[in-house]
Amino acid sequence: QSMWRYAPLLPVPADVASHRNLAPGMTKLVRADNLARELGMKTLYVKDDSGNPTHSFKDRVVAVALSAGQQLGFTTFGCASTGNLANAVAAAAARAGLRSCVFVPSNLEAGKIITTAVYDGTLVAVEGNYDDVNRLCSEVAGDFGWGFVNVNLRPYYAEGSKTVGYEIAEQLGWRLPQQVVSPVASGSLMTKVDKAFSEL
């Protein structure tokens, strides 16, 4: 009962994917009748990815990126993050017995730093904004040969988002919703849910 039920549709072999992985996914699709009524809609569901191991959909993308990265020979994994991705990378690396080194802006809220630090990986606070952190990670990925889930492993990372779309379709009895509202961030979640629907 995890996203790995769709392993044949993901860019990592099933045996690699299931090895020491946090197995995110198959989170609840909650019918939100009160919200639907308030918005004047007949039926509305909310995909609640807070049920994932670190309470974010980022666990999905990290699971695919780490699995692919291990297959490619990486033993240290990192990311540029403002919170949720850092948590997901640190937790997944710890579970798999791998090293993590995550980079965050130095002014990140203390609560987000603590929830990443508990996994005992390396946490680097960078003076600057997220763009500065991301640029640094691009340089470090090339210099150290580490697997950065949102830099040199980005194509695999993005494919993990498809599992949201697969699950929505399965949980609706293999029917597609008429509309989907998605947080944008980098845009990857929105485009990959659409890709999942197209593939199905």
Image (cartoon, helix red, strand yellow):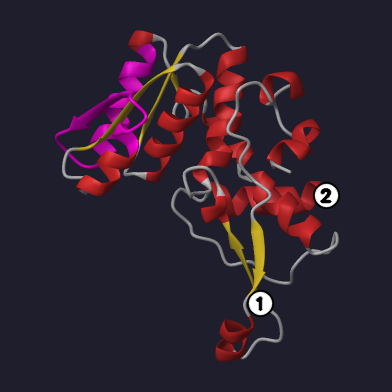
**Magenta includes 17?**
no
- 51 vs 102, nearest the viewer: 51
First in residue order: circle 1 vs circle 2:
1
- 135 vs 99, nearest the viewer: 99
The image shows residue 39 at horizontal and vertical percentages of 57, 87
Asked if residue 150 shows in the view, the reply is no
State the CA–CA distance, disc 1 to disc 2: 21 Å
| SS assignment at label 1 | loop
Residue at 33% across, 10% down: 143
On screen, residue 138 above or below 60: above
Residues in magenta? 116-142
On screen, residue 26 above or below 94: below
The image shows residue 72 at horizontal and vertical percentages of 59, 12
Q: Which picture quadrant has residue 77?
A: top left
The image shows residue 6 at horizontal and vertical percentages of 77, 38
Q: Which residue is mark 2?
A: 200
Image quadrant in which the N terminus is located: top right
Q: Which residue is mark 1?
A: 44
Disc marking residue 62: none
Question: For this view, does 112 lie left or right of residue 146?
Answer: left
Asked if residue 175 shows in the view, the reply is yes
The image shows residue 116 at horizontal and vertical percentages of 33, 36
* Amino acid under disc 2: Leu
* Amino acid under disc 1: Leu
Question: For this view, does 130 lie left or right of residue 54?
Answer: left
Question: For this view, does 177 lie left or right of residue 44?
Answer: right
